[in-house]
């Protein structure tokens, strides 16, 4: 009998507490996302799908701009698997203005067959004047 009274009192306290807490948020503000710990300036130029990371390696990217500001980038990659075990990847470049905003016009995903132990070049160019670039690589879908 004593346990039942204790339980009833605790339930009442919990219900009063829940009612009081629900009345505290009178503003009903929108939920904000947490800040990204990787700042835009520190974000890597080349990112890849995790499944590719043990197998695909890259050499130093080469980026050039012409007199109009059109940027051309070439990233050499190589597959570390054994002979006969090729893979197909998709890649796309995103080019940015000076302020770090993506250019309005961007190229679409491209396909590339990567043979084992042979270097291939993932190339792309901006469609307008660009200041920076980023490359995404994923398994072909």
Image (tube, rainbow, N blue to C red):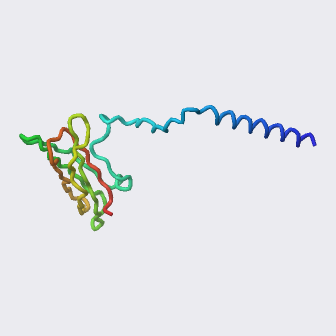
| Image quarter hosting the N terminus | top right
Report whether 107 appears left or right of 28.
Answer: left
Q: Which residue is drawn at 69% across and 37% down?
A: 19
Residue 80 on image: x %, y %? 29, 57
Q: In this view, does 38 lie above or below 87?
A: above
Q: Which residue is drawn at 25% across and 57% down?
A: 109
Q: Is residue 65 above or below residue 80?
A: above
- The image quadrant of residue 42 is top left
| Front residue of this view, candidates 139 and 79 | 139
Residue 63 on image: x %, y %? 16, 43
- The image quadrant of residue 86 is bottom left
Report whether 54 appears left or right of 128.
Answer: right
Report whether 56 appears left or right of 107.
Answer: right
Q: Which residue is drawn at 30% across and 66% down?
A: 85
| Image quarter hosting the C terminus | bottom left
| Front residue of this view, candidates 29 and 3 | 29
Looking at the image, the residue that sits furthest to the bottom is 84
Q: In this view, does 45 lie above or below 91?
A: above
| Front residue of this view, candidates 37 and 79 | 37
Looking at the image, the residue that sits furthest to the left is 67
| Front residue of this view, candidates 42 and 76 | 42
Residue 89 on image: x %, y %? 28, 60
Looking at the image, the residue that sits furthest to the right is 1
Q: In this view, does 35 lie above or below 75?
A: above
Residue 41 on image: x %, y %? 30, 34
State how many labels appear: 0
């Amino acid at each position: 009998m004593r346990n039942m009274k204790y339980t009833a009192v605790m339930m009442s306290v919990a219900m009063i507490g829940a009612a009081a807490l629900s009345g505290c948020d009178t503003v009903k503000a929108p939920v904000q996302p947490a800040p990204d710990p990787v700042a835009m300036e520190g974000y890597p130029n080349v990112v890849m799908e995790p499944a590719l990371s043990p197998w695909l390696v890259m050499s130093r990217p080469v980026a050039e701009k012409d007199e109009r500001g059109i940027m051309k980038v070439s990233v050499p990659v190589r597959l570390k698997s054994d002979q006969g075990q090729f893979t197909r990847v998709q890649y796309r470049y995103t080019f940015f203005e000076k302020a770090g905003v993506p250019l309005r016009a961007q190229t679409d995903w491209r396909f590339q067959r990567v043979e084992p132990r042979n270097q291939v070049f993932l190339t792309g160019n901006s469609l307008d004047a660009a200041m920076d670039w980023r490359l995404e690589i994923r398994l072909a879908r």
